[in-house]
Amino acid sequence: MKKHYVIFVAACLIAAFLAAEFKSSVNFSTAQSYEQTYGQIQADMNDAGDSETYMIKTSMRSIGWEEVMRTIVEGNTDAGKSMSEQIRQNAIEHAEDGNPAFGRTRGVFAGIVNQVSSGSIIVTAVAAIASITGSENLGVMVMIVLGALLMFAFWFLIQNVFPVVTRRVFLEGMNYKRITPQRFVFLLRIRKWLKASWIMFVKYIFYSLWCLTVVGIAVKRYSYYMVPFIVAENPGMTARQAIALSRKMMKGHKWECFVFELSFAGWEILSIVTFGLFGVLYTNPYKTAVFTRYYAALRALAKEKEIPGSELLYDTYLYETADPQLIKETYHDVLAVVENTPEKETGLTGWRGVLARNFGILLFRRKEDREYEQRQAEMVEIYGLIDDTQGEAYPVRLYPVPEERRRKLVQSLNYMRHYSVWSLIVVFLGLSFCGWLWEVGMHLVSYGNFVNRGALHGPWLPIYGTGAILILTVLYRFRRNPALEFAATIVVCGFLEYMTSLIMEIATGGMKWWDYSGYFLNLNGRICAEGLLVFGIGGLAIVYVIAPIVDDIVSRVSEKKLKVICVGLTAVFLFDAGYSQFHPNVGKGVTDIQAREASEAPAHSEQRSIS
């Protein structure tokens, strides 16, 4: 528990939010929502002024997509559509009157939030199915069946099997110091996710049938108690084998397990009085860790007594470390790379070494630099296996069912490479041009006319290129961890976009070059969650795919020609940037102000502005 506190808490918290188990532990968020609701009621009463207005406002807020769905099921699609539109308009007005960061008038996120919360997505789906089938009632039935199938699929594939995922994480934490987030997809890597789901489903059916009897509710709960642990160790067995083995292991231990659970009553009470918060932070991971040890003890006892089926529990290295000689034979390629990597990289000393190690920049590609990059590529491929060879993590290559060894695109492209100055210039100008194409194309599709977007006169938007260079250099050390790279990209690009907006507005006398007001989760109209998500995804694409491909192409061009092209394009860009400081590219369509004004204006005003 102490060694793996963070990942154990994370595993139990994910299970709670997925409603796979520990569901009562998220009560603290419910309590917080009650407090917020009470505060909103008080605000409504103060704003309304009279009881009739208050009743109208609160009744509109209490109606949700469930009411819309009920109305549609009753056969009144038009009424459901009207109700959905009223809910949407009320939500937009409430968002605009409240915190502007939660805008609901513009953007993809705002559209999704509005459609889901108002139920319009259901109305649209029913109407679409009805138009195809020619029957409104059939459209409603299809929606109900599809909804039920989706709910079952989510339960069967996620909620039903996640306890097995959690037990696997805890089992590996017994003897190893390091558990990576990749272990959450252990079942996928050995291609046993569906098998584990099926076993847990059969266990659920058996227990549900036993619950029809008074005795079965308690007895079979403890008879099947070890099934998730057994499946976490060997998901390759059949459902009957897993259930039968659990029954045999728990024979004579059911009362003991019941008393053992009772010993956690004090911790459970603490969790209840803190609305589940203490359960999230301590009780759930602590109890799961304890019962993981309990399973290990019963497993050892079953092995000792040679209980039929115990031979299927063959994951030895969950409970003991592997022999060093076996590790050496199995991980010989990994050890060879580690042993042949010099402690101090030659040719990358001084300021060259500082640039290479901290920012991934090489001014010139010498022979030593190419050799260094080749070693880095090899290290990337085996990076996740080094801890296995040192006994720090579970040796995945020794598991009886071999894990799938995929040749990842990001590995074949060697995303840990270093970029020369010329490659960085090409990336900067290329992505600045692609950003310009993107915004010009979006404006052309949205408004039907061509507009040269951006403050510069040439076909480039340097904010895109600058963001790409910052991601490749400043975030170089995050590349080994895609999750950290994604988060850091959002932070860096968000800061860059916000400051660019602020500086350009100050430099041009208050002119806004873009405005995200009305977008869901925006900050002063300068940045929004929707844009940051795109930046994060785009940043991953740049680091792991686009930039390596560009660098490979650049490396095939003769250095002499490359220098001429890069110097020429850079000179043109700098001239445009300098000229635009005094004569910026301004005018209709360059900024986003017209679109914002149009969206906020009444319908007749919008029509007048378009004409």
Image (spheres, rainbow, N blue to C red):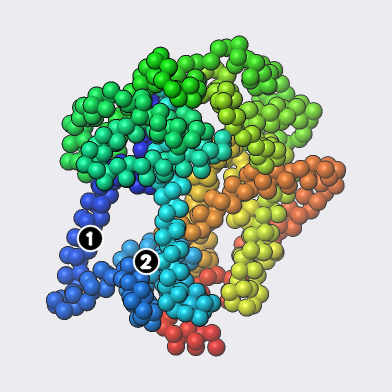
Residue 152 spot, x, y in % from top left? 42, 54
Q: Amino acid at mark 1?
A: Thr
Residue 333 spot, x, y in % from top left? 68, 21
In the foreground, 197 or 125: 197
Crowd around label 2: few <14 · some 14–19 · many ≥20 (10 Å): some
Mark 1 residue element: helix
Whole-Å distance between the Cαs marked 1 and 2?
A: 16 Å
Q: Quadrant of the C terminus?
A: bottom right
Would you say residue 207 is visible in this rendering? yes
In the foreground, 283 or 429: 283
Q: Quadrant of the N terminus?
A: top left
Residue 158 spot, x, y in % from top left? 44, 46
Residue 446 spot, x, y in % from top left? 58, 74
Would you say residue 176 is visible in this rendering? no
Query: Would you name the residue on which mark 1 appears?
Result: 37
- Identified at 52% across, 18% down, the residue is 391
Count of numbered tags = 2
In the foreground, 388 or 137: 137
Placement of 99 over or under 451, stated as above or below: above
37 relative to 568 in the view: left or right: left
In the foreground, 33 or 450: 33
- Identified at 47% across, 16% down, the residue is 320
409 relative to 297 in the view: left or right: right
Q: Earlier in the sequence, mark 1 or mark 2?
A: 1
Query: Would you name the residue on which mark 2 appears?
Result: 117
Q: Amino acid at mark 2?
A: Ser
